Amino acid sequence: MRYWLFMAAAIVTEVIGTLAMKYGTHHASHATGLAVMYVMLVLSYTSLALAVKRIPLAVAYGAWESLGLVLITLCSAWLFAEDLKPAKLAAIALIIAGIVLLERGTEEAPAGGDHAA
């Protein structure tokens, strides 16, 4: 369970970092937006590295990129008034379906799996 919390932290910090980058370009706080982006992306990669100790890499990376993309798309529509046309909504549904299928087809590493086989 702890590794899934690292996974969630990796996704959330990636989303915050990317949104901060976009926010900074639209406001006078460009340097602040970039600073927040850098800090959040370092935290994101660090959390992802901790998550892959137990979560298979294909699942972790797929979830990190895909769920991050979905959340960034939804937050961009909400915060920056970017459009959410039916094609984007269909793509989001397909991305989520792909993550679910990938996770169901992959076994989690054993508890003592912190070292290479």
Image: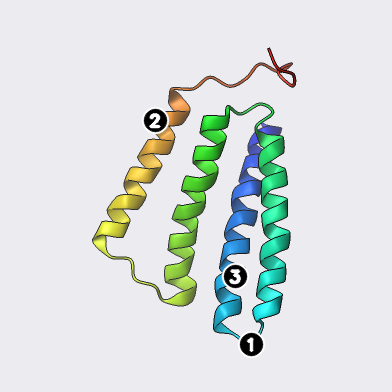
Q: Are marks 1 and 3 in contact (CB under 8 Å)?
A: no
Q: Position of residue 67 (x, y in %)?
A: 49, 48
- Mark 1 belongs to which amino acid? Ala
Query: Which is nearer the eye, 83 or 25?
Result: 25
Residue that badge 2 annotates: 101
Question: In the rendered view of the protein, which quadrant contains the N terminus?
Answer: top right
User: Marks 2 and 1: CB-CB under 8 Å?
Assistant: no
Q: Position of residue 49 (x, y in %)?
A: 69, 38
Identified by mark 3, the residue type is: Met
Residue that carries the numbered disc 3 in the rendered image: 21
- The crowd level at tag 1 (other Cα within 10 Å; few <14, some 14-19, many 20+) is few
Q: Is residue 90 above or below residue 2?
A: below
Mark 1 or 3, nearer chain start: 3
In the rendered structure, the answer to whether residue 54 lies left or right of residue 105 reads: right
* Amino acid type, mark 2: Leu
Q: CA distance from mark 2 to mark 3?
A: 31 Å
Nearest the camera: 77 or 42?
A: 42
Toward the top, the furthest residue is 117
Residue at x-position 49% and y-position 22%: 106
Q: Is residue 76 positioned above or below 90 on the image?
A: below
In the depicted structure, whether residue 104 falls above or below residue 29: above
Residue named by callout 1: 28
Q: Earlier in the sequence, mark 2 or mark 1?
A: 1
**Of the residues tagged 2 and 1, which is closer to the observer?**
1
Within 10 Å of the Cα at label 2, are there few (<14), some (14-19), or many (20+) other Cα atoms?
A: few
x and y percentages locating residue 32 in the rendered image: 71, 76
